[in-house]
Amino acid sequence: MRPKTARILGLAVLLQTGIPPGLAADTDSLDDVLWPLTPLHPQATEEQPAVFDEPPISVAEDPCDWRTDIPHWQEDVRDFVRGATCHTFRYVDSWFGSEIDYPENEVNGLLRVGAEYEEYYGFDEKLKFRVRAPLPNVSRRFDVLLGRGEDDEFISDTETQTDTFYNPGLVNRAIDNDASWLLGLGGRRQDGDSGWDWSVGMRLRSPPVPYVKLQWYHYHRFSPDTDLRFRQTFFWRSDDGWGTTSRGDLAWEIGPADVLRWEGVATINEVLYGTEWWAGQTWYHVAGDRGAWSLLAFARGETDWEVPLKEYGFNLVWRQPFTRDWMYLSLGPSLTWPKEFADEKREASLGFGVWIEMEFGQWTWR
């Protein structure tokens, strides 16, 4: 792969895009570099200071506690969130014994704050918090998963593509979607081109909603410039019953700074009238050294619904690091033509969104 193109597909903002850990180290893969503008950032140390003129970071006596020698609000927020989650999950792991030292460096996560407004759907706040942490005294193959966001989309593997920057938007944009907290225990797949993931957990609301999720992943690289990914997800929720989602995407490098991506998603479950589907094509472009944008054309709908084609349109997103190499600013407009019900008239709907993401630890969407 060309060196500059290796920076294209990232700027990623669910937790899972289905990238096997073994592939993340393959520099010839289109999906290798999830962060086109910066490397996959390690924690800064006094020997290896961070960029953007950040103050040096010192390791406290407790590995869960990090501090900056010169305080800034960015580091204060990150260190508080990381420290709180690290202490919490290390404490939970201690319930199962202390034979294995807790790997504090493996606690990682992402926090997003922002908002989006559309003429048709109205105002939608963007507050998402995701944490992935190991439980070595239970099993090295288990992770604790904690997050706040659209739990329906995580369980069914139909999360909005703002979460990956692969296609910035618009899966499951239902009017009654409601964000909530989700807590689960997940199993890791083996390294390689194919494998299984699983997780069990609970939607934290009254009353609680338990779920089970099993996912099969397959990756195939046709050439250094072209790859194919496929995921089949089987899930169960106590309120919606059984369901399954098929998801595939094809990526093609068309130049040193450009990638095209085609993606399709189809979901069936016990509460849908038919098959809920989404299809889109996205053009990614690196513009200079510190920014990139994506342009998405998409359509979505549901078979056997009173309006089979619920929405189509375009979405443009600009993304760049914001004051730190582990914080990102994303913003952009959208132009769509939604119609959810038969008695509505399909009209153009303008929208605009802006949000900031903060990473801690070795976070990647996978």
Image (cartoon, grey):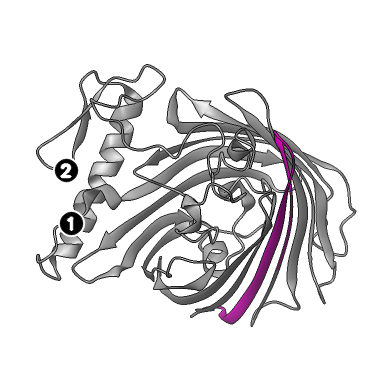
Query: Which amino acid does the dot numbered 1 rest on?
Result: Tyr
In the image, 119 versus 160, the foreground residue is 160
Q: State the extent of the magenta-drawn residues as a range.
A: 240-265
The majority secondary structure of the magenta stretch comes to: strand
Q: Quadrant of residue 323?
A: top left
Is the N terminus in the top left, top right, bottom left or bottom right quadrant? top right
Query: Separation of disc 2 and disc 1 at Cα?
Result: 10 Å
Q: Is residue 160 left or right of 239 when viewed as pictured?
A: right
Residue at 14% from the left image edge and 58% from the top image edge: 101
Q: Quadrant of residue 234?
A: bottom right
**Residue 242 located within the stretch drawn in magenta:** yes
| Callout 1: SS | loop
Whole-percent x and y of residue 63? 16, 43
Q: Which mark is residue 102?
A: 1
Residue at 37% from the left image edge and 45% from the top image edge: 362
Q: Is residue 174 visible?
A: no
Q: Which residue is mark 2?
A: 63
